[in-house]
Image (cartoon, rainbow, N blue to C red):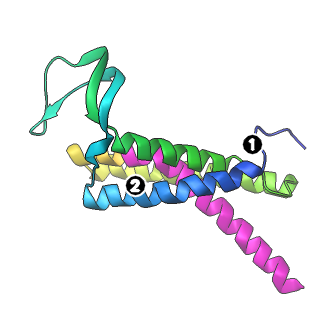
């Protein structure tokens, strides 16, 4: 069996504990356009452009401190950390079958993700395309986690039915 770069199994539980609330908060941010004012702070930015009235303002800032609302940043970072811990932690019993399932799920997630992106390139235009690209950053992990865990569930259910 090849040595995969996976985290120990204990990180999977931590990942779910971070991922579930981050997903709920992300959905709230998407649906309600909700931002907390106490998440406004001064942060270091490698590059920052201002958008006023839907237009980019000339003269972006490079390597400077800016004052901004970091609600989306915090939720996105928590989601990515939780999803990566969940997706890339070993199962309790990691064998060749699980490794093959993990690889096929990842390949399947990449295919589906890029097919969705292709459809977006063809059918989504304007500022809405920027939103599609933002969501696209997360879809490979979401599709991978969903498919991998669904197939694991189906296999465990099938084994339980045979007993």
At mark 1, the secondary structure is: loop
Answer yes or no: is residue 103 visible.
Answer: no
- Residue under label 2: 26
- In this view, the residue in front, 65 or 52, is 65
Magenta highlight on residue 43: no
User: Magenta span: helix, strand or loop, mainly?
Assistant: helix
Identify which residue is drawn at 53% across, 60% down.
Answer: 20
Q: Which residues are magenta?
A: 134-163
- Residue under label 1: 7
- In this view, the residue in front, 74 or 91, is 74
Outermost residue to the top: 63
Which quadrant is the C terminus positioned in? bottom right
Answer yes or no: is residue 88 visible.
Answer: yes
- Residue 17: where, in percent of width, then height? 60, 57
Magenta highlight on residue 154: yes
* Contact? badges 2 and 1 (CB < 8 Å): no
- In this view, the residue in front, 79 or 102, is 79
Identify which residue is drawn at 9% across, 39% down.
Answer: 53
- Residue 82: where, in percent of width, then height? 57, 49
- Residue 76: where, in percent of width, then height? 44, 44
- Residue 44: where, in percent of width, then height? 36, 22
Q: Residues within 10 Å of mark 1 (few under 14, many from 20)?
A: some
Q: CA distance from mark 2 to mark 1?
A: 25 Å
**Number of numbered discs overlaid on the protein picture:** 2
| Among numbered discs 2 and 1, the one appearing first in the sequence | 1
At mark 2, the secondary structure is: helix
100 to the left or right of 145 = right
114 to the left or right of 91 = left
Q: Residues within 10 Å of mark 2 (few under 14, many from 20)?
A: many
Identify which residue is drawn at 31% across, 16% down.
Answer: 64
Identify which residue is drawn at 76% across, 78% down.
Answer: 157
């Amino acid at each position: 069996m090849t040595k995969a770069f996976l985290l120990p199994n204990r990180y999977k539980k931590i990942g779910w504990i971070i991922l579930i609330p981050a997903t709920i908060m992300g959905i709230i941010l998407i649906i309600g356009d909700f931002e907390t004012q106490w998440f406004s702070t001064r942060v270091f930015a490698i590059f920052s452009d201002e958008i006023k009235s839907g237009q980019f303002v000339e003269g972006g800032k490079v390597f400077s401190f800016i004052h901004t609302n970091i609600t989306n940043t915090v939720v996105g970072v928590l989601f990515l950390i939780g999803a990566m811990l969940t997706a890339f932690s070993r199962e309790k019993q990691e064998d060749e079958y699980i490794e093959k399932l993990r690889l096929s799920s990842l390949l399947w997630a990449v295919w589906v993700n890029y097919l969705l992106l292709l459809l977006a390139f063809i059918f989504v235009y304007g500022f809405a395309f920027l939103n599609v690209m933002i969501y696209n950053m997360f879809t490979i992990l979401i599709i991978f986690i969903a498919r991998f865990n669904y197939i694991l569930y189906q296999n465990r259910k099938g084994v339980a039915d045979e007993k």
